[in-house]
Amino acid sequence: SNAMKSAIADVFLFYSQTFSENDVAIKAVDTIIDQFFEPGGWSQCFENIYAIEANIPQELDLYIPSAQEELYNWVNGPNRQFEAAFRIIQSGEWGEYDGFYLMEGDSVPIKAHWLDVVLSEIDVNRPFAI
């Protein structure tokens, strides 16, 4: 569709805690951003790349699947990170967006042009929500 030809997608590298408190996270995001701008890199598919953070304190950034029967907040980290991502993107500080797709860190695309398929589904099924 014509909407697909003009669709713009940005990448947000979204860290659950604070980059300044984790040298490994800083190095990882710097590497990804450097690769984004290399010839043949992600910049061919995405307009912009941003590194943002949820600032969740380490003691609250929990993801303990083995404790889901005993610990009510066993999944607190991913839940708070999703909430923070939604609020940050909705704020307009990084641009105006009419939607977003949250790809969790353990997701790995296995189909070529997967983003085109997602954007097409959104376009065909407007208003689209999950």
Image (cartoon, grey):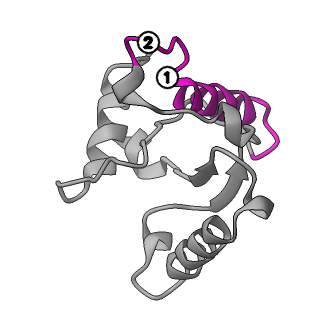
Q: Is residue 87 magenta?
A: yes
Q: Report helix, strand or loop for mark 1.
A: loop
Report which residue position mark 2 lands on.
Answer: 70
Looking at the image, which residue is at 50% across and 86% down?
A: 38
Judging depth in this view, the residue of 108 and 124 nearest the camera is 108
Q: Nearer the viewer, residue 97 or 49?
A: 49
The picture places residue 44, in percent across and down from the top left corner, at 44, 71
Q: Is residue 14 left or right of residue 58?
A: left
Residues drawn in magenta: 68-94
Label 2: state its secondary structure. loop
In the rendered image of this protein, does residue 102 appear above or below residue 113? above
100 drawn magenta: no
Q: Residues within 10 Å of mark 1 (few under 14, many from 20)?
A: some
Q: Is residue 105 above or below residue 22?
A: above
Q: Quadrant of residue 60?
A: top right
Relative to residue 108, is residue 22 depicted above or below? Answer: below
Task: Say if mark 2 contacts mark 1, CB within 8 Å.
Answer: yes
94 to the left or right of 3: right
Going by the numbered disc 1, the residue's amino acid type is Trp
> Which quarter of the picture shows residue 124?
top left
